[in-house]
Amino acid sequence: MVARAQDATVLEPTRLANHESDRLSRCRRHGSGLVVQQRKSPMLRNVVMGGLAAAALAVSAAAVAQQAVPGGTAAEARTMLERAVVAVRTDKAKALDMFTKGEGGFKDRDLYPFCFSTSDGKVLAGPPFVIGKDIRTFKDSTGKEFGKENFKAAVEGRITEVGYLFPRTNEGPPVPKVSFITGVGDLGCGVGYYP
């Protein structure tokens, strides 16, 4: 005999089949029969909690990664530019190759030198996605023509600061950046940092 009682099914003990004997652990006595307790499936709760935990872990891992590797400072960027100028004056071809490959200490966290020709603006060293392009055509996401400013700032014996928005990585969003720019022979070179 089966009767319904408030979110539970009452079963007579004599009518339980063998395959239902494992349910006895979830049953309690109710009068002359057993009441099978109706439990909500914990699967949905576990899936939601697992998803929330995974999201929290991903966010905190990204935050730790950003804090664990701070960017270069203005002083470090200026020092790297001064070293880059010496390298270009010593052996221009070797220097440009080292800058492009990040060798010889010319890649430090988010600091790296970039150089362009002062005759045609062609970028000769820097991030791969800008090499070969005319620096004078570079604009940031606000429309600021920072490439033209960089080009004009390439004056031998003078270091000029140029501020603009630029991504930290190829796929990253543009963020504020300041570059120190100077002229070295027929090149303009710079090193930027993210304040």
Image (cartoon, grey):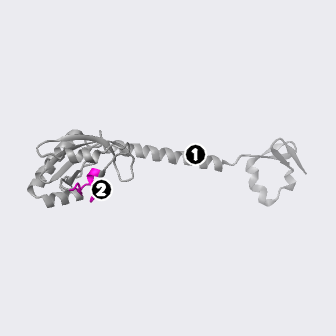
How many dots with numbers? 2
The residue under label 2 is: 130
Residue at 55% x, 48% y: name it: 51
Residue type at mark 1: give it. Met
Q: Nearer the viewer, mark 1 or mark 2?
A: 2
**Residue interval drawn in magenta:** 120-136
> Residue lying farthest right?
1
Q: Is residue 142 left or right of residue 150?
A: right
- Counting from the top left corner in percent of width and height, residue 137 is at 30, 51
Mark 1–mark 2 Cα distance, whole angstroms, equals 44 Å
- Counting from the top left corner in percent of width and height, residue 30 is at 83, 42
Q: Is residue 114 left or right of residue 24?
A: left
Q: Is residue 27 above or below residue 132?
A: above
Q: Magenta region's main secondary structure?
A: loop
The residue under label 1 is: 49
Residue type at mark 2: give it. Val
